[in-house]
Amino acid sequence: MSKKKKDWKTEKERLLRLDLEERRKEYRKDFTQLENIPTWRGENRSKNNDGDDEEQTGGGGLGDKVSLYKGDITVLEVDAIVNAANTSLLGGGGVDGCIHKAAGSCLYDECHSLNGCDTGKAKITCGYDLPAKYVIHTVGPVARGHVSQKERDDLTSCYKNSLDLMKEHNLSSVAFPCISTGIYGYPNEPAADIALNTVKKWIEDNPDKIKRVIFCVFLDTDFAIYKKKMAIIFPDDDIEDEKEQLKEESIPPSTQSTTNEETEESEKGKLVTKALCLLVSVFFLLQLF
Ligand code: AR6
């Protein structure tokens, strides 16, 4: 007997009413909680402390709001995952195919109701069977190795418009795949530059609007690229502060020599004063006799 097909609107309303525990019972596979994904700062700190179990929630700086995660985006339990879709929004290969497969047929039906999406723009749907509550579908530029200002602008818009949609829906955690770098052929290094710098600028402009942005990479090459670039774009603020403080506290050699000279001068002054006092005393004593 065939199962009755679910209506996406009813299903969306039902799912969005469930609390987290109830939702978890319905996930189709294992999931990764946000709490188990270290922040960029937390990860670097624990490495620098030789595995010390330092608390990972920091002071709310940029490094506390981003993470680098390697793996399948469909297992992430975040408010929204971003899909690298095409203009039809009706599914395809790559990460788009994985997301549709994991979310189930209601995702296709809701996407069908959206009348497609232009390159650089973004649209939001429910996450259905995914651990992510929502899916933000954005359409990256088709580069196939050739990148002009148009492609750069479109890719920047993908990240910016997706984050704006998050803000509009009061969502606070999101995971991005490396948009356009697969089938659409955007070169990985410049794509990572755009992803990281656009997200950084957006967080700086909206510091209270986002709890975490996860850069979800799938390939070793992207992992290496993001790791290298994140160290520069999201430096550890506290380590930088500590370095500054140490600089201020240590007295530079040039200042030290001045200090020594000053000490010698004041010692000489004291001797001269003592000698003068002695001379004046002798003078008065001689007057008495
Ligand atoms: N989780 C995370 N990242 C993944 C996953 C996954 N499960 N699977 C692949 N990636 P692509 P595009 C990475 O090709 O270049 C589709 O047919 C992948 O390694 O999915 O924007 C759409 O319908 C790469 O780093 O997206 C469009 O027609 C990144 O996801 C077209 O492809 C993006 O690769 C969009 O092409």
Image (cartoon, grey):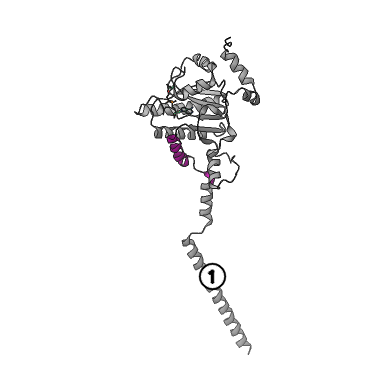
Magenta stretch mostly in which secondary structure? helix
Q: Amino acid at mark 1?
A: Ser
Helix or strand or loop: what does disc 1 sit on?
Answer: helix
Residue 228 lies in magenta, yes or no? yes
> Which residue appears at 63% of the width and 24% of the height?
25
Quarter of the image where the C terminus is located: bottom right
In this image, 101 relative to 150: left or right?
right
**Residue 224 % position (x, y):** 44, 38
Whether 276 is drawn above or below 65: the answer is below
The N terminus lies in quadrant:
top right
Give how far across and how far down residue 95 sits, in percent: 47, 25
Instruction: Look at 53% across and 53% down and name the residue there.
Output: 246
Image position, residue 99 (x, y; %): 50, 23
> Residue 269 at what x, y percent from top left?
54, 73
Q: Is residue 267 magenta?
A: no
Q: Measuring 36% from the left and 29% from the top, which residue is drawn there?
A: 149
Which of these two is toward me, 50 or 265?
A: 50
Q: Is residue 122 left or right of residue 169?
A: left
- Magenta residue span: 220-238
Give the residue pinned by disc 1.
266
